[in-house]
Image (cartoon, rainbow, N blue to C red):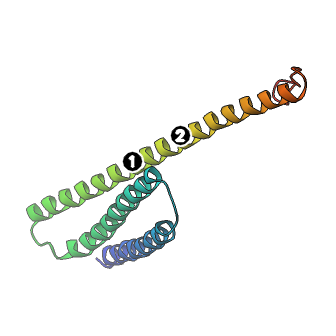
Amino acid sequence: MWFSILFGLCLCGLSAIMLMRNRAAWRTVDGTERDEGERSFQQRQYRRRGYATALIGVVGLSIILSVWVPDSTAAAFYWIGVILLVCWMALLAVADLIATRSHFNRLLQDQRDERLVLEAELDQIRRHQGNGQAKPSKDSQ
């Protein structure tokens, strides 16, 4: 009984700390100049992480309150509800993982595309300055 209460309190405390950190991270991002796509991604990320973190607190509170569920049938339904909350929290975490990975892959591809454009411009400048003689770049050696 005491272990359940202690574990639930730890989850609630962890949730509170994570909510504060998530909010602080949002405040630092909110004040910066970002393009609309980046801002939209960060806003959705903040919301996803906030929901998942709040669910940690709800699960912790549910564990604490489970001590006072008297009937075994009621306890079974109660724990099924808690398990469903944990599954929902896991789905939110997976969604956050996929969205973050997709976002950063898109940023990486944008950087690669920009690099190719800049390298082509640099090659053109080198050809123009070298009377049509392209100097070998470091990548081609």
Among numbered discs 1 and 2, the one appearing first in the sequence: 1
Disc on res. 66: none
Horizontal and vertical percent position of residue 35: 48, 54
In front of the other: 40 or 98:
40
Q: Quadrant of residue 1?
A: bottom left
Horizontal and vertical percent position of residue 130: 90, 26
Q: Is residue 63 left or right of residue 139?
A: left
- Look at the image and tell me in which quarter the C terminus lies: top right
**Residue name at image x 84 percent, y 27 percent:** 128
Residue 105 vertical position relative to residue 36 in the rendered view, above or below:
above
**Residue name at image x 23 percent, y 61 percent:** 82
Dot 2, crowdedness within 10 Å: few (<14), some or many (≥20)? few
Q: Nearer the viewer, mark 1 or mark 2?
A: 2
Q: Say which amino acid is labelled 1.
A: Val
Horizontal and vertical percent position of residue 75: 14, 64
The kind of secondary structure element at disc 2 is helix
Residue 55 vertical position relative to residue 109 in the rendered view, above or below:
below
Q: Are marks 1 and 2 in contact (CB under 8 Å)?
A: no
The kind of secondary structure element at disc 1 is helix
- Residue that badge 2 annotates: 105
In front of the other: 132 or 122:
132
Dot 1, crowdedness within 10 Å: few (<14), some or many (≥20)? few
Q: Say which amino acid is labelled 2.
A: Asn
Horizontal and vertical percent position of residue 140: 82, 24
- Residue that badge 1 annotates: 94
